[in-house]
Image (cartoon, rainbow, N blue to C red):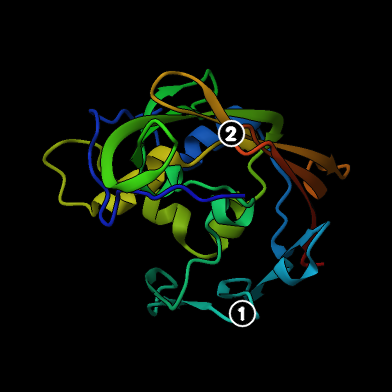
Amino acid sequence: MKKQNNFFLISLTISIAISCSEESVSDDFEQVNGDVAVKLMESISVSDTEDSSDNTTVTMYYTNDGKLNTISDGNQTNVFVYDNDNKLTRITSDGDNLNMEELYESPYDAFDTGEVVECDDNNNPKKIEFLVEECIEDDYDYCYDEYEIKIYTAELSYDDAHNPFYHTFNAGGIIDVLDNVELNFGSSQSPEIVKVKDLFPMNNLSQIIYKNEEGEQLVSLNINFSYDDENYPTSATITAVDIEESEQSVYKVIFTYID
């Protein structure tokens, strides 16, 4: 599936971003989902049904006391570093192994570069706007080295199930960091951290529909999950449809958890 040229090298503000809630992430999660069983994710395996060379497995490793220690796909690794009070101090990284759009084979970087402009009733991001550098074509559909900036949207839908990554992120100290974000214009917090909080969903993402500036649907990602008795996903089928290119790709995902 063809990837678009993203305009962002650094995140640019295309509108005044909104936060889906002024409450902490942990408070919102509990309010929306209630008392959720704690399960720590062990691995996520994604396989391309047509090209096995694209298969990947992301594995999470934990310390003896249950703290998230390392995330690795075999090539790139993120290491979580804590202080003496078990507070997350930094994540050393040579990659981005838990980028959800990359994991789910998205052709865009809306989660990395976009801004939330609409939320649903459960404080999930519902619509994200992001900028795309679009090639200017001539009458023969030939693309010269000239581009214009367009505002694209990603429209998100969710299953009636909790975000399965919540407790894994909590084990990595990430939820504590997000809970301490001050949502005001005078905040000295890192804008990247504020963005993560704004984009953090309470429920399990099951669909992304990408549209261009004219509102035409370009790409859809539909994720059909199977769940266990505690409403954690055990497997999923991702169907990615590129309308412009008339292409469809199907991926299989397997989730495992620490016993």
- In the rendered structure, which disc, 1 or 2, sits on the residue that comes first in sequence? 1
Tag 1 secondary structure: loop
- Marks 1 and 2 sit apart, C-alpha to C-alpha, by 46 Å
Of residue 39 and residue 49, the one placed in the foreground of this image is 49
Residue 183 position by quadrant: top left
- Where is 61 relative to 258, above or below? below
Question: In the image, residue 236 lies at what x, y percent?
Answer: 80, 46
Residue of label 1: 63
For this orientation, the residue located farthest to the right is 229
Name the residue type under label 1.
Answer: Thr
Residue 13 position by quadrant: top left
Of residue 131 and residue 134, the one placed in the foreground of this image is 134
Question: In the image, residue 93 lies at what x, y percent?
Answer: 43, 76
Q: Residue at x 38, y 38 (%)?
A: 198
Tag 2 secondary structure: loop
Name the residue type under label 2.
Answer: Glu
Q: How many marks?
A: 2
Residue 244 is labelled as 2
- Where is 68 relative to 190, above or below? below
User: Residues at badges 1 and 2 in contact (C-beta under 8 Å)?
Assistant: no
Q: Residues within 10 Å of mark 1 (few under 14, many from 20)?
A: few
Q: Residue at x 71, y 30 (%)?
A: 159
